[in-house]
Amino acid sequence: MNLPNKKTASISPAAAITYYMSLPFIYLVSILPFKLLYSFSDFLNYILFNVIGYRKKVVIENLRNSFPGKTEQEIYNIAETDSERSQFL
């Protein structure tokens, strides 16, 4: 019985190097306690949302469309408190 030839997946050397270099970091993160992980996540959220402004315009615009009766201050308050809970979901 002849089986069809399957091409084997080839991985580029750069992808393999990146993978093997990231393994120690992934392992270290996996053994951290949850309290420390949440603190790190809160820190990243603050940097990404408040300092860099990642997706801030999109969040504000979506809130304006969803709550047309809210004031600008209320919308900004919702954006800040909501970003703390679900920035990366």
Image (tube, rainbow, N blue to C red):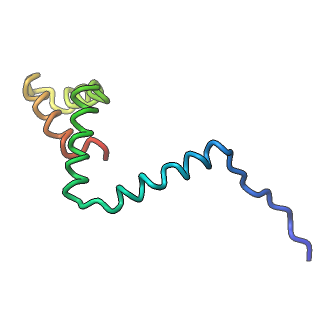
Residue sticking out furthest to the right: 1
**Residue ID at (13%, 28%):** 75
- Give the vertical position of 12 relative to 30 (above or below): above
What is the quadrant of residue 8 in the picture?
bottom right
* Nearer-the-camera pick, 25 or 15: 25
In the rendered structure, the answer to whether residue 26 lies left or right of residue 31 reads right
Looking at the picture, how far across and down is residue 45, in whole percent? Answer: 24, 38
Residue sticking out furthest to the bottom: 1
Q: Quadrant of the N terminus?
A: bottom right
In the rendered structure, the answer to whether residue 29 lies left or right of residue 20 reads left
- Give the vertical position of 45 relative to 23 (above or below): above
* Nearer-the-camera pick, 51 or 84: 51
Looking at the picture, how far across and down is residue 17, in whole percent? Answer: 60, 47
What is the quadrant of residue 13 in the picture?
top right
* Nearer-the-camera pick, 50 or 27: 27
**Residue ID at (48%, 50%):** 22
Looking at the picture, how far across and down is residue 33, in whole percent? Answer: 24, 61
Q: How many marks?
A: 0
**Residue ID at (55%, 52%):** 20
* Nearer-the-camera pick, 6 or 60: 6
**Residue ID at (31%, 47%):** 89
What is the quadrant of residue 64 in the picture?
top left
